[in-house]
Amino acid sequence: MNYFRLGFALTILAFAGNVQSAPVNAPLAEVVGHLAAAFATHDPARISHAYRAMGDYALPAADIVESTINAMGYDLLENGEIDAAIKVFDLNAHTFPLSANTWDSLAEAVMTKGAYESAIRYYRVSLKLDPESNHAAQMIERMTAEPQFSYVSGNKS
C-alpha cells in the first residue's frame, strides 16, 4: 500500500473541516483517526466498520475518501489479495453508488477473479453512470466477444 498517499489523504481529511470550510471539530478528527487506525490493519472488515462510522463526516471528505479507498483496493489487487480487494471495491461502490469509477474498479476486480457475469454487470453500471466511458464499453464488448469469455454471453464455442 502506498502509505505516503494514504497518510497524506488522511491528514487532509483531519484538517479539511467540511464543505463550507468550517473549523474541524473533535468528532470529525476522532472518526478520521479511527479510519486511519483501521487502514493500518489492512483488515477490510475493520476498514468497512470505520468507514461507515464516519456517518455525516464522510460527506465533506467524500472525494478524498473515495479515491483513497480505491487506491487501497488497487494495492490489494496488485498484491494478489483479490478477495480483499473485491471487498474494498464493493464497499466503495456501495458507499459512492453514483461514482462510475467505483463500479469500474469493482468490475475489474471481479473480472480478475473470473466472475465475468458480475464484471459485465458492474461495467454496465459504470457505463450507465458515465456513458462516455470507453474503458467500460470496451471491457463489456471484450467479455461478450472474445472466445475465453464466450460462455458469459451464452455463446458456446
Image: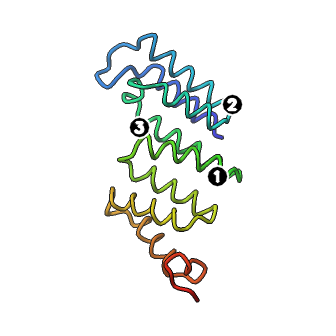
Q: Residues within 10 Å of mark 3 (few under 14, many from 20)?
A: few
Q: Which residue is mark 2?
A: 41
| Coloring scheme used | rainbow
* Three-letter code, disc 1: Leu
Earlier in the chain: of badge 1 and badge 3, it is 3
Quadrant of the rendered image containing residue 5: top right
Name which residue lies at 66% across and 35% down. Answer: 43
Estimate the spatial distance between the alpha carbons at disc 1 and disc 3, rounded to whole Å.
21 Å
Name which residue lies at 38% across and 19% down. Answer: 17
Asked which secondary structure carries label 2, the reply is helix
Asked which secondary structure carries label 1, the reply is helix
Residue 66 left/right relative to 19: right
- Point out the image quarter for the N terminus: top right
* Three-letter code, disc 2: Thr
Earlier in the chain: of badge 2 and badge 3, it is 2
Quadrant of the rendered image containing residue 18: top left
Answer above or below: position of 12 versus 148.
above
| Whole-percent x, y for residue 153 in the image | 49, 78
Name which residue lies at 57% across and 77% down. Answer: 149
Q: Which residue is mark 3?
A: 63
| Whole-percent x, y for residue 10 in the image | 53, 27
Earlier in the chain: of badge 2 and badge 1, it is 2
